[in-house]
Amino acid sequence: MTSETSAYQALCAAFARIHRYEHLQGIVSWDQAAYMPPAGNEARAAALAELAALLHRLRTEPKIGHLLTQAEAEPLDAVQRANLREIRRHWLLATAWPEDLVERRALAGARCEHAWRSQRPANDWTGFAANLRPVLEIAREEARLLAERSGLGLYDALMDQYEPGMRAAEVARLFGEVRRWLPGLIQRVVARQADEPVIEPVGPFSVPAQRGLCEQVMRRLGFDFQAGRLDVSAHPFSGGAPEDVRLTTRFVEDNFVLALMGTIHETGHGRYEQGLPRAWLGQPIGAARSMALHESQSLSFEMQLGGHPGFARLLSPLLVEAFGDQSAFEPHNLHRLLTRVKPGLIRVEADEVTYPAHVILRFEIERALIEGEAEVDDIPAMWDERMQSLLGIDTRGNYRDGPMQDIHWTDGSFGYFPCYSLGAMYAAQWFAAMRRELPGLDTAIDAGDLSPALDWLAARIWSQASQWPTDELAQRASGETLNPAHFRAHLERRYLRD
């Protein structure tokens, strides 16, 4: 190690150590959701809080600030400069919070999520709200401290953790545009599909057969089972570590589509993690760029590919093999089944046309919560009003399928929800760029060849990790920064074109 690069190399060593502890944190958190027996929760919550405190101490060591100053003066190449930029961003975020806040967040989140598992089936809003209040108070404290450090607004400061550079005003503008045309589009598509008969599959569909199907489709999508696995949890998620990706899904015997499409969604996340450049592993530059870009991968898999007629042709023989022959599995009918638009209660089960409504609703509510314009007790009424205006659905009294359906708020992940619809916009933009560059893309997918799309994503998104700020990455990948026009054009082309 030369003296010219000693400060930078010392930073790299410090963050490699942090990455190894984060690896353990990811696996332990996955186990908590997938395999931990209920009686272990208090001990696990305490252990995770202890680990969170340890990581916080490592991230905020005073020497890191000194090394950052020294490294800025060293002769670094472009990749090292990009890593130094990301190291500084991580350090600034971490040093905004005291250690006791980090521990309190971990404890409150673990307790709230664990209680949610039994409170949601019981429709117990009162019990859930009691656990959510301390989580919200901690999130507000986090927002205040981050805002003081960054100069951003309260909600902006939280969102910047997940989507660096994006601001609530821009999200509100983008979502405001979608709000204007989405309800009308939903009505037009539902009316059009009313004249298109769909044969429903006949179950039951055994869980072992569903699991085998899901794993077979994951392999078709390139998931490496030597570096990851699929398990079951109450709420599907991707976790673990880039070297050991843990995906979860959930099975119901009367509807294989839920597990299948949820697994395809999580496989998009998993492929992104598995596709990150191993040379940068353990460094901030080697991490996924942002959560909207992460969601753009899951939605590229679930919506862009999963809703393609060629994908239905690929799935058809796999369904026959798993469940036996049914007329419902004929490719044309299967494509109609997978692209059926119907306003519903549950976000993770929503089709791609109604999905943005679920995200807009949560963005508007959580922004008000963080900025002190609403309290936990206001959530049900706000939820009911927005579900009615956006999707025409009455949710009064149905907390289980309303504000209790997701786990994001239980662990304090306020600021995350916008990433879902931003990700859908990016996904449409990626495929628009692919079609310009690869005129034979749809023909290849129709023939069951997904490699052109997957190779494009690997080269333009996965391999770039956090080398570039988000706008520059989008510009390099697709020729422009985020352009939501591609999303509307995609929906109209798929659902309204003859």
Image (tube, rainbow, N blue to C red):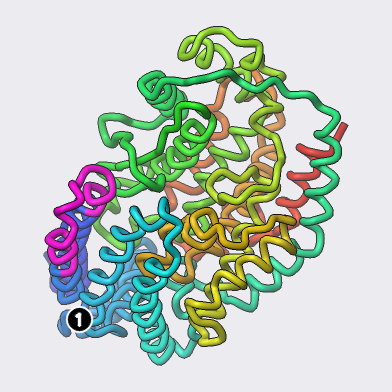
x 57%, y 34%: residue = 453
Instruction: Return the x and y of residue 221 as percentages of the image width and height.
Output: 46, 29
Instruction: Return the x and y of residue 327 as percentages of the image width and height.
Output: 66, 11
x 27%, y 60%: residue = 283
Inspect the magenta stretch and tell me whether residue 59 lies in it: no
Residue behind mark 1 = 99
Q: Locate residue 350: give its quadrant.
A: top right
Observer able to see residue 4: no
- Is residue 255 toward the left or the right of residue 278 in the image? right
Q: Nearer the viewer, residue 369 or 431?
A: 369
Q: Nearer the viewer, residue 217 or 427?
A: 217
x 13%, y 71%: residue = 54
Instruction: Return the x and y of residue 2 as percentages of the image width and height.
Output: 13, 68
Query: Dot 1: what SS?
Result: helix
- Is residue 21 toward the left or the right of residue 308 in the image? left
Q: Locate residue 219: give its quadrant.
A: top left
Tell me the chief SS of the magenta region.
helix
Inspect the magenta stretch and tell me whether residue 48 lies in it: yes
Instruction: Return the x and y of residue 286 as percentages of the image width and height.
Output: 33, 55
Observer able to see residue 333: yes
User: Which portion, as a residue range, is magenta?
Assistant: 29-49
Type of the residue with mark 1: Glu
437, above or below 59, in the image: above
Q: Locate residue 175: give its quadrant.
A: bottom right
382, above or below 355, in the image: below
Instruction: Look at the image and tell me in which quarter the N terminus lies.
Output: bottom left
